[in-house]
Image (tube, rainbow, N blue to C red):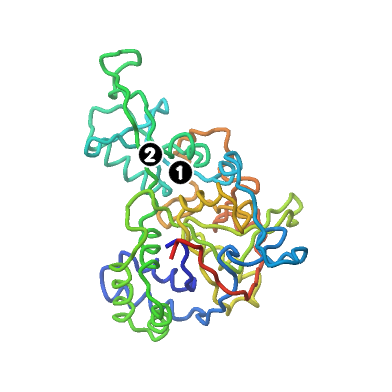
Amino acid sequence: MLFRVILVSCILFVSSVVGSSSSSQLSASIGSSSQAALFGVRGGAFFGFGRKQSNNGDGDDDDNNNNTPKRFPPMSQQEIEEKLNIPVFGLTDAQGNGVILSDNGNNIFHFFFSKHMADAALKAVTAANAEAPELRVSAFHLGKCWFKLIQGHKMFELRKYGKNKGDDTTTSTKPVQFRLVPNSKDLMGARILTGLKPGDVDELKEAIETPDAPKAVSIIQSAANDANGFTNAFNEIPCFAISQMRVRKKNEAGEPIGEPMLPFHLSTKTMGDTWSEFTRHAPQFEDAEATLQLVELHKMIEMMQNPSDFDFRNIVFIVPAYDQDLPNNDDTDDSDSDDDTGGGDNGMTADSGRSYNECEIEPYVSMEVFADAPGYN
C-alpha cells in the first residue's frame, strides 16, 4: 500500500511508545498524549490523484475546462538528485573508502539516515575487527548516491583492509549492494500504520484520550502483526507529509519567497516539531488535527520518473533529526564537501536548534475527496 491517511497525533503517539516495554511507560505516554487536540479535520488529498490540478500542482486548475486531470512531465535525473538533498551516513576509512560488510556471501554497504545508528554500527564493526585501520562515520549526499550506487547492483574493486592498492593478490571485483537503513522507530511507526484497519484510528484516539493503555497496546500490537508494508529493516524508507501544511524559503530579509512546497519528512520527530512550530506561529490551528500522508521513498522516486497528476517539483524534503542524534556533532567526515547539506529549495533544515528561521510554514486547506493511487490498495 502506498498511502495511508491517519491523524498526526496518532502516529506521534505510536512513535513515542514504540520500543516501550512496560505498561507503566505506555500509560505515561498515553496520559501525556491525551492532552493534545484530536478532533481531526481531514483536509488535503493524496497528491490530487483523480482530480484536477492547479498550475502549481496541488489545487484546481481554473484554466482547465474539461474533467481531464492535468498531467505533469517526469522529473529528470538531475531534478531528482537535487530533490534528494539530504545527508545519509556510512562507514569509511580515513581515505574515504567504503567499509564493505559480508552477509551470506553478499557484499553490502549501508547508508544510515540516523547518525546515531551509524555511530552504533561503527562501534560494532570496530570491536569485531581489532586489526582494521581507523574507521569513521562519513556523510554522503543521498541524491548523488541514488542513481550511481543505490539503484541496481554494480561491480566494484574490493580490497582487504590494510592492503596496498595495486596488489592484485588482494583485490577482487565483485557486486556490492547499497542498502538504505531507516530510523528504527520511524520504520516501526510506518509498519503499524499499514496494519491499521478501518475504525482502528478512532479506537486508538479514544484509547489515548481516555486514557486506556491496554486497549492502545492491543491496537498497536495487532496492527504491527497485520502490517503489509515496511516489514524489512532496510530499503523501505517511510516518508511522512502533513496535508494541511506548506513551506517556503526565506530570503535574507526574512521574507518568504517562491512557490509553497509540500514538505516531506523522513523523521516523525522532525514532522512533529514542524507542526508544533506551525501551530505556535498560527494559534488558530492549535486545535486542528492534521492529516498524515505516508509513502515509501523508492515508490515516490518511481512516480517522479513518470508522468503524474501531481507535480513532484513542488515538494521539499526536510533534513531529518532524530532523538538520539546530537545537533552540533562535528566529528562526522563530510564526504561530499561541495554539498550544503540541505540548502536551496531542494532541501530544508527545520530542527528545533535552528528555530525554523530559514523557512516560512503556511497552512494549506483543501476539503476535497481523498483518492488512492491505482494499484496500491
Label pair 1/2, CB-CB below 8 angstroms: no
Q: Position of residue 94 (x, y in %)?
A: 39, 27
Secondary structure under tag 1 reads strand
Q: Tell me which residue sits at (33%, 72%) in the image.
A: 220
Q: Tell me which residue sits at (41%, 71%) in the image.
A: 13
Nearest to the observer: residue 131 or residue 2: 2
Secondary structure under tag 2 reads strand
The numbered mark, 1 or 2, whose residue comes first in the sequence reads: 1
Position of 354 relative to 289 (above/below): above
Looking at this view, name the residue that lies furthest to the bottom.
210
Q: Position of residue 125 (x, y in %)?
A: 27, 38
Q: Quadrant of the C terminus?
A: bottom left
According to the picture, the residue beneath numbered tag 2 turns out to be 178
The mark found on residue 88 in the picture is 1
Q: Tell me which residue sits at (31%, 81%) in the image.
A: 215
Marks 1/2: CA distance?
12 Å
Nearest to the observer: residue 67 or residue 252: 67
Position of 169 relative to 17 (above/below): above
Toward which corner of the image does residue 101 lie, by quadrant? Answer: top left
Nearest to the observer: residue 365 or residue 11: 365
Q: Nearer the viewer, mark 1 or mark 2?
A: 2
